[in-house]
Image: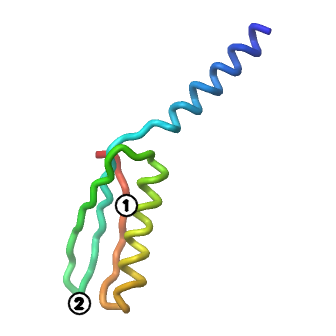
Amino acid sequence: MKKFTIAVATVLALGGLNACTSDYVCTCDVTVFGFPVSVDTTFTDVSRGDAEDECQALEDETNEGSGGLATASCEAAKA
């Protein structure tokens, strides 16, 4: 029973680490009409997965919504 309790506590502790939130910066290197631009967007108090998803969405919006006039490559990193 003691081993089971320790195992459950370990799983819960590790699961709790994944739920931590922090601030993340999404840096997008954008090329518009051949000119490079860097754009930073800050996500406050979000999980790593949510920050990565939002950053990917920014990249997708830029690449798909510009009609081929702009290209972007975005990456999220802890602030």
User: Is residue 41 positioned above or below 10 on the image?
Assistant: below
Locate residue 45: give its quadrant: top left
Label 2 CA crowd tier, 10 Å (few <14, some 14–19, many 20+):
few
Residue 33 is situated, as x and y percent measured from the top left of the image, at 23, 90
Distance, label 1 to label 2, CA atoms, is 21 Å
For the point 23% across and 67% down, the residue is: 39
Q: Is residue 7 left or right of residue 27?
A: right
Residue 62 vs 78, above or below: the answer is below
* Amino acid of disc 1: Glu
Secondary element type, mark 2: loop
Q: Residue furthest right?
A: 1
Tag 1 and tag 2, C-beta contact below 8 Å: no
As rendered, which of 36 and 22 lies closer to the eye? 22
The residue positioned 42% from the left and 84% from the top of the image is 64
Q: Residue furthest top?
A: 2
Which residue is at the far front?
45
* Residue at image location 30% in from the left, 67% down from the top: 28
The image quadrant that residue 14 belongs to is top right
Instruction: From the viewer's perspective, tell me whether residue 8 is left or right of residue 38.
Output: right
- Give residue 75's mark: 1
- Would you call the spot at circle 1 few (<14 residues within 10 Å), some (14-19), or many (20 or more)? some
Sequence-earlier tag: 1 or 2: 2
Residue underneath mark 2: 33
| 54 relative to 43, above or below | below
Type of the residue with mark 2: Phe
* Marker disc for residue 3: none
* Quadrant of the frame with the N terminus: top right
| x then y, percent, for residue 57 | 43, 68
Look at the numbered disc 1 and give the secondary structure of its residue.
strand
Question: Residue 20 in the image: x percent, y percent?
Answer: 45, 36
Residue 66 in percent (x, y) is at 34, 87
**Residue at 63% across / 22% down in the picture?**
10
